[in-house]
Image: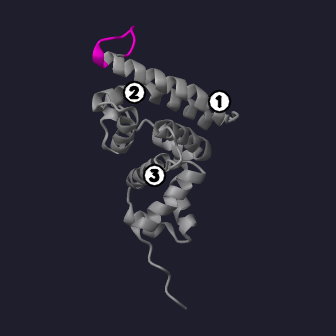
Amino acid sequence: MPPKPKITKDMVVNAAFEIARTEGAEHINARAISKQLGCSTQPVMYLFPKMEDIKREVYAKADAYHSTYITNVPDSSNNPMLSIGLLYIRFAVEEQHLFRFLFQSNQFSKQSFFDLIDAEELEPVLAVLQQATQTDREQAKDIFLSIFLPVHGYASMLANNSMEYDEASIASHLEKAFQGAICVAKMSNTGNIGGEIQ
């Protein structure tokens, strides 16, 4: 009879990630993970004596998965930032449990919105935004903050309610918010708020 495969940390994290994805992070525990792996709880508890450590690893994995998902913009996109916003919302629709785990589990306790904007994980998105809008880094941050809140609002509503997902309607609203945010950011830079862009 062949020996049972050795359980590794990666195997435990991957199993816990699948639980978070299909059932919710609140269902991550040694028994559920061992059932997913087809083993006893002993190797799980040996590798991760504290469940908080597993959840921390799963959060990082979910965060990386989310980043890849929202930056997978089609080459045909005329507006990469609008595409990223729509992908963020679609993620909330398709991956409701992961969305809640990432953004509605008090992971950002004691942080401000400006802390979030300065996070290293946001660098690729800000780079796309800066290039797409031909703005400097500070203007790009202002634009991002202005459009992030309506994008996140849509995503949160869809992740937590059985609502109809009308991507065309959402895209139309976001396009208006996006263009408005660009105008305000550029006018703020020239001190011309309330007037025309020069």
| Nearer to us in this view, 166 or 119 | 166
Q: Main secondary structure of the magenta part?
A: loop
Q: Which mark is residue 159?
A: none
Quarter occupied by residue 154 = top right
Would you say 8 lies left or right of 192 here?
Answer: right
Q: Residue at x 29, y 32 (%)?
A: 137
Location of residue 41 in the rendering, given as x and y in whole percent from the top left corner: 49, 66
View extreme (front): residue = 198
What type is the residue that disc 1 sits on?
Ser
Report helix, strand or loop for mark 3.
Answer: helix
Residue marked by disc 2: 143
Q: Which mark is residue 68?
A: 3
| Nearer to us in this view, 100 or 46 | 100
Check disc 2: other Cα within 10 Å, few if <14, some if 14-19, many if 20+. many
Viewport quadrant of the C terminus: top left
Residue marked by disc 1: 169
Report helix, strand or loop for mark 2.
Answer: helix
Q: Residue at x 47, y 48 (%)?
A: 66
What type is the residue that disc 2 sits on?
Ile
Whether the magenta-drawn stretch holds residue 191 is answered as: yes
Report helix, strand or loop for mark 1.
Answer: helix
Whether the magenta-drawn stretch holds residue 107 is answered as: no
Check disc 3: other Cα within 10 Å, few if <14, some if 14-19, many if 20+. few
Would you say 132 lies left or right of 78 here?
Answer: left
Viewport quadrant of the N terminus: bottom right
Location of residue 107 in the rendering, given as x and y in whole percent from the top left corner: 40, 38
| Nearer to us in this view, 32 or 100 | 100
Q: Nearer the viewer, mark 2 or mark 3?
A: 2
What type is the residue that disc 3 sits on?
Thr
* CA separation in Å, label 1 and label 2: 21 Å
Counting the numbered discs, the total is 3
Numbered range of the magenta stretch: 189-197
